[in-house]
Image (cartoon, rainbow, N blue to C red):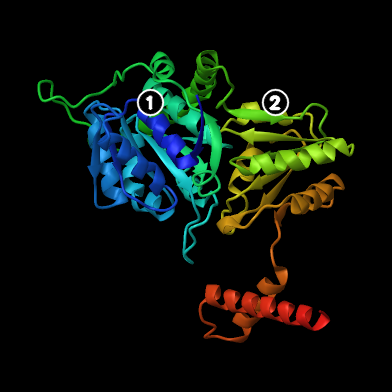
């Protein structure tokens, strides 16, 4: 059924169709609308026997999810940014215990300075926590991925994050094709947990493990991620057979046939990049796009196959490992070792900065000419950066960086406005 919905409400309605038994969540922008709407659906009796738990923090939310999942209940939660960091200990515990929890991450920047807009720093901070991480390009895909996420989580007995861009997707109204309850029931069977805490059959989970076995335990967690490389595309194929559309999987290729330059990205920016690539293709440039759907497990072999014909790869990502480089790009570089294909890192959209088609045109044209540096910061204000570096070197008590940057930008904006007024 076609419906015009806010992305957050589309996800909440998809969650309801999956028949969760427990939802625990704490509000934090930009995921709040998801759990608010889940609460409304529970109150209205549209989620069956689901228990909606009000908790006091994000840490409490995921801790309660761990308890409910360990008792055999289909369990869901959502968070973003500092909320994800606050539950970090529980994030590792959930995966270490092998619990099939599904959690939405409404991607948002991490402070300080405080920033509520979108980038991927929060998800990337937990990339090695043992959760499967799926990234949505559109609200339709976000809806579809949540339905697939429960099946992936429960088949592997491993938690899954579904990552969707905060505000860009969560607060955008789009037309989505909402499945019927019958379709979801056909696709997603009732939960059959691998482990259940049961007083009539008591045992411990999360017991202490010493040096004699810890490496083996961690390797088995790694092996589940490797299993997911097969399970994720299998479930995407099952989804296509029942719902009639492609959604999910490890990667997606767009106009890569014969491409000499291939752009790799993940999340909603893929749409803007595809529009740019269409214009460049029409102008005769041999350029294409590969979108990563699963960041964990990392689809190294699939990417290597998709990129093998390229002369250069440009990775556009909304994350950055300070002092090192692009997070996604460095994963791709490891996958492309020995191919001789040059991989460029482009850091873009941090803190919600717009990624525009004109900027992408300039970026990709520079890459095609082989003039792009190894690590590039899209639309970085070098004048502001250099002025701040000079100020810090000149003043021992230089004060906070963020406030100084804002003053410089406001001063620059005021100067531009004044000069435009004089010319007028």
Position of residue 296 in the picture relative to residue 339 (left or right)? left
Q: Position of residue 282 (x, y in %)?
A: 86, 36
Dot 2 corresponds to which residue? 305
Distance between the Cα atoms at labels 2 and 1? 36 Å
- Placement of 115 over or under 396, stated as above or below: above
- Front-most of 13 and 231? 13
Dot 1 corresponds to which residue? 17
Q: Residues within 10 Å of mark 2 (few under 14, many from 20)?
A: few
Q: Residue at x 67, y 52 (%)?
A: 355
Q: Residue furthest left?
A: 200
Position of residue 270 in the picture relative to residue 46 (left or right)? right
Q: Residue at x 36, y 35 (%)?
A: 95
Position of residue 185 in the picture relative to residue 417 (left or right)? left
Q: Is tag 2's residue or tag 1's residue first in the polypeptide sequence?
A: 1
- Front-most of 217 and 65? 65
- Front-most of 23 and 129? 23
């Amino acid at each position: 059924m076609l419906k015009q919905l806010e992305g957050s409400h589309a996800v909440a309605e998809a969650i309801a169709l999956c028949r969760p038994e427990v939802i625990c969540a704490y509000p934090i922008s930009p995921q709040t609308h998801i759990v608010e709407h889940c609460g409304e659906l529970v109150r209205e009796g549209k989620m069956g026997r689901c228990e909606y738990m009000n908790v006091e923090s994000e840490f409490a939310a995921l801790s309660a999810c761990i308890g409910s999942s360990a008792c055999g209940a289909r369990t869901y939660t959502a968070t973003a940014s500092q909320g994800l960091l606050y539950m970090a200990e529980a994030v590792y515990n959930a995966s270490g215990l092998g619990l099939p929890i599904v959690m939405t991450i409404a991607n948002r920047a991490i402070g300080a300075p405080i920033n509520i807009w979108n980038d991927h720093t929060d998800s990337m901070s937990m990339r090695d926590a043992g959760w499967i991480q799926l990234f949505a390009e559109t609200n339709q895909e976000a809806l579809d991925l949540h339905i697939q996420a429960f099946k992936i989580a429960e088949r592997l007995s491993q938690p899954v994050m579904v990552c969707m861009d905060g505000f860009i997707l969560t607060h955008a109204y789009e037309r989505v094709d909402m499945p019927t309850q019958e379709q979801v029931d056909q696709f997603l069977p009732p939960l059959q947990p691998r482990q259940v805490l049961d007083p009539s059959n008591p045992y411990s989970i999360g017991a202490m493990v010493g040096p004699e076995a810890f490496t083996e335990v961690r390797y088995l967690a790694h092996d589940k991620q490797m299993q997911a490389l097969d399970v994720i595309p299998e479930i995407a194929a099952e989804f296509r057979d029942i719902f009639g559309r492609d959604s999910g999987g490890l990667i997606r290729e767009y106009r890569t046939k014969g491409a000499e330059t291939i752009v790799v990205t993940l999340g909603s920016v893929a749409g803007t990049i595809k529009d740019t690539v269409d214009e460049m293709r029409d102008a005769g440039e041999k350029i294409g796009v590969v979108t990563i759907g699963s960041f964990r497990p990392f689809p190294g072999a699939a990417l290597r196959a998709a990129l093998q014909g390229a002369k250069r790869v440009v990775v556009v990502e909304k994350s950055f490992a300070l002092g090192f480089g692009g997070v996604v790009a460095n994963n791709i570089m490891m996958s492309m070792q020995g191919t001789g294909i040059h991989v460029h890192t482009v850091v873009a959209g941090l803190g919600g900065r717009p990624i525009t088609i004109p900027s992408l045109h300039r970026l990709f044209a520079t890459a095609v000419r082989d003039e792009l540096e190894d690590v590039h910061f899209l639309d970085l204000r070098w004048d502001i950066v250099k002025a701040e570096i000079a100020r810090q070197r000149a003043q021992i008590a230089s004060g906070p960086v963020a406030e100084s940057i804002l003053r410089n930008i406001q001063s620059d904006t005021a100067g531009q406005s004044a000069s435009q007024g004089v010319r007028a």
